[in-house]
Image (cartoon, rainbow, N blue to C red):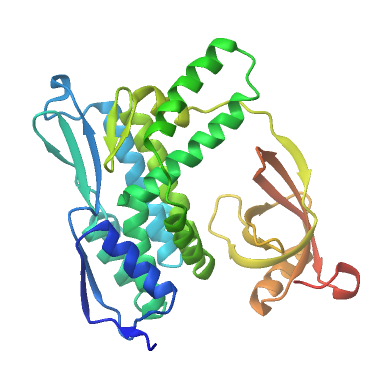
Amino acid sequence: MEAEVLPGALHLETEDDAWDLLRRILAHDAKVVHLPKLTFGEWAKVDVYIPGKRYDSAITPEMMKGWLELQRSVYRAYSYAKGGSGAASSLTDRERDDLELIVEVKGGSSDQSVDLQAVIEKTAATMADKLDPTHITIIVISLGLMWAGSSVFKAWLSNRKDIKMAEIDAMKNKASIEAHMKALQTISDIVIADKNRAELIATAAAEIPVVASIEAEAAKGREALVRHVTKGDAVVNGVLVHGEAGQSITSRSRVASEDVRLDGIYKIRKVDTTVATGFRVHLLRQSGEEIVGDLAELMTTLDDREVIRSAEWQKVPVFLQVNAKSRHGEIKDAVIIRARDYDPETDGEWD
């Protein structure tokens, strides 16, 4: 059956509408010929509801910290969308003004919300001359779902719960273990993650790398917002988060990291020379995992940098020696110490 050609304007009244359209585009059941004007219903807001007379029509300094962190993550996500490094400092004053989040506080309790329509429109506009209409449409829909969708928020809660459960296994204080377990059980009771929808975002991220970068920033914004608004119970994007659970999943555990070597074949996604470290490299491993590494100033040479630049421009693999730290299987603080040209005879084929 021939794919449906999407019209020039589309209104996504509900979150389900957005998921359905994203699914159809990714499955090639819907075809984007020209970039449509997308508008969203009331669901496309970041919502926080905190019951209780104490917070009637109020927003406390602690709550405001969460919104400010969310604002910073919006700036960084926009920087990625326009082809930048994710640094908020790369935005112009005009861009910052256009992306400014306006927190509306309603009465009867503390009912706070931010409408994302303007942010979404600005992000779409900055990509207009860089990507094809299909990719822009996928990114815009994903952006709305990642920031405001209850399904993505539930999946994030479930993932954070699993991470915290793994950390609990390493705890020795029985009282701390019991407190965390009790708090995390409330997440299990209310959250059923929709794996099919999570897979749609993963598919979009695999097809368009900037989606993965934006989701990483959205996750940082989610974590900061939950950490600062759950001093008591709160409803975030339509999902109840008990105060103890919110504090548990956003608490920073002191987990020992393991030094690891990740020598091997990589492809260079991007080289960023605007960062404070001077030379940051976005890498793709043969396994499909993406990591970001800085160049060790005292270890690498100009020849190493030239090898990396050449591999990026020619889109060919490169052999790197990489030091990193691993925490719960997640790679952190990767540092490239040597680079040389890829040799398929000695290094093996890139699968």
Q: Nearer the viewer, residue 288 or 79?
A: 288
- Horizontal and vertical percent for residue 196? 45, 57
Q: On the rendered structure, is 122 left or right of 290?
A: left
As drawn, which residue projects farthest toward the bottom? 2
Quadrant containing the C terminus is bottom right
Q: Nearer the viewer, residue 155 or 68?
A: 155
As drawn, which residue projects farthest toward the left? 107
Q: State the residue at coordinates (32%, 84%).
A: 4
Q: Quadrant of residue 305?
A: bottom right
351 shown above or below 154? below
Q: Can residue 85 be seen?
A: no
10 shown above or below 106? below
Q: Can residue 99 be seen?
A: yes
Q: State the residue at coordinates (68%, 29%).
A: 256
176 shown above or below 248? above
As drawn, which residue projects farthest toward the front? 1
Quadrant containing the N terminus is bottom left
Q: State the residue at coordinates (31%, 58%).
A: 144
Q: On the rendered structure, is 111 left or right of 69?
A: left
- Horizontal and vertical percent for residue 315? 66, 76
- Mark count: 0
